[in-house]
Amino acid sequence: MTGRSHRFPRIAGAGLLLLVGSFAGGWVGQQASADGDADLRTQQPLSVPTTRHVTAERGSVQAVVVLDATVVAADSGASQSLKQSSLVEAQIRPEQLARFSSLPSTGKAKVDGGPATTDCRLSALITGEGSDVSPRIRCTLPQPVAYPGVRAHLALTAGQVHNVVVLPLSAVDGSSKRGMVHLVQGGTSRPQKVELGLRDGVNVEISSGLKAGDTVLDPPPSLFASDDQK
């Protein structure tokens, strides 16, 4: 079977760019020239963000897990749905649960349309049946605040550390327990492996590999390198 060539329809005064894929440096497209012939071209590669120097400092990190929650009835029974409740319940995914070395005894709950954020006491961890059912956490407020079904948010502290070496998350290439930074020394930089601890969404604890006062590139160039360049 012989192949057939196709010509793009002519568009007066302009070319037609058809996006057909992407790569690390930018989009690849087919450009139809004014006479209708198509050729493969590449747009200018995406620019790499300008790096800055940041210094590792000593500080504190508090890791907080925020869960979507719902006010639930304290007891079963149809009549309970007509009473305000002090109990909030949230599903917690296994990967979120893994962030806790041990569950805290208290949390903070904010009920939609209810009072300000309030301390609550963790009263139950309910494990689901089957691998596709996430565990549920229940937290009890000091007094009834809303009817069952009202949405809420539950915040739990997964851990906190003080007087540790910290960096902005944007300065670290990596996740979980290991990462890479680019250490600045003598006007040049070199890759440096680091061990990671707690993170709070802004900063991350550097457990080992750097000391307070070390300077690194932010963001690290390795974030934009291809796999064979790392």
Image (cartoon, rainbow, N blue to C red):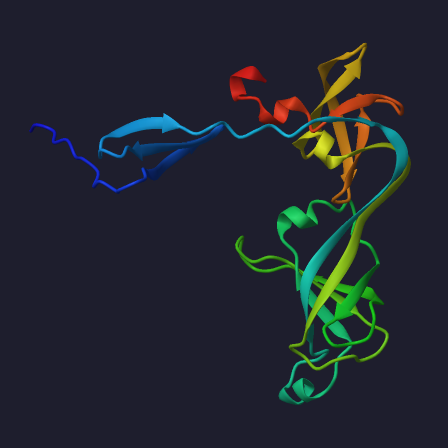
Which of these two is toward me, 116 or 75? 116
Q: Between residue 20 and residue 79, name the one nearer to us.
A: 20
Image mark count: 0
Q: Is residue 55 left or right of residue 94?
A: right
Give the quadrant of the C terminus. Answer: top right
Residue located at (67% from left, 79% from top) = 148
Q: Residue furthest right?
A: 163
Task: Residue at 86%, 74% (x, y): give it.
Answer: 142
Reply above or below: 221 against 132: above
Q: Report x, y in % for residue 114.
A: 77, 76
Residue in view at x 77 percent, y 58 percent: 155
Is residue 46 positioned above or below 9 on the image? above
Residue 205: quarter of image = top right
Give the position of the N terminus as an image quadrant. top left
In the image as oriented, which residue stretches furthest toward the top? 186
Q: Nearer the viewer, residue 103 or 85?
A: 85
Which residue is painted at 82% across and 67% down in the image?
A: 117
In the image, residue 135 sits, relative to residue 165, either above or below, namely below
Looking at the picture, how far across and down is residue 165, in whole percent?
86, 30
Q: Position of residue 139 (x, y in %)?
A: 77, 66
Residue 37 shown left or right of residue 89 in the figure: left
- Image x and y of residue 42, in percent: 40, 27
Q: Residue furthest left?
A: 1
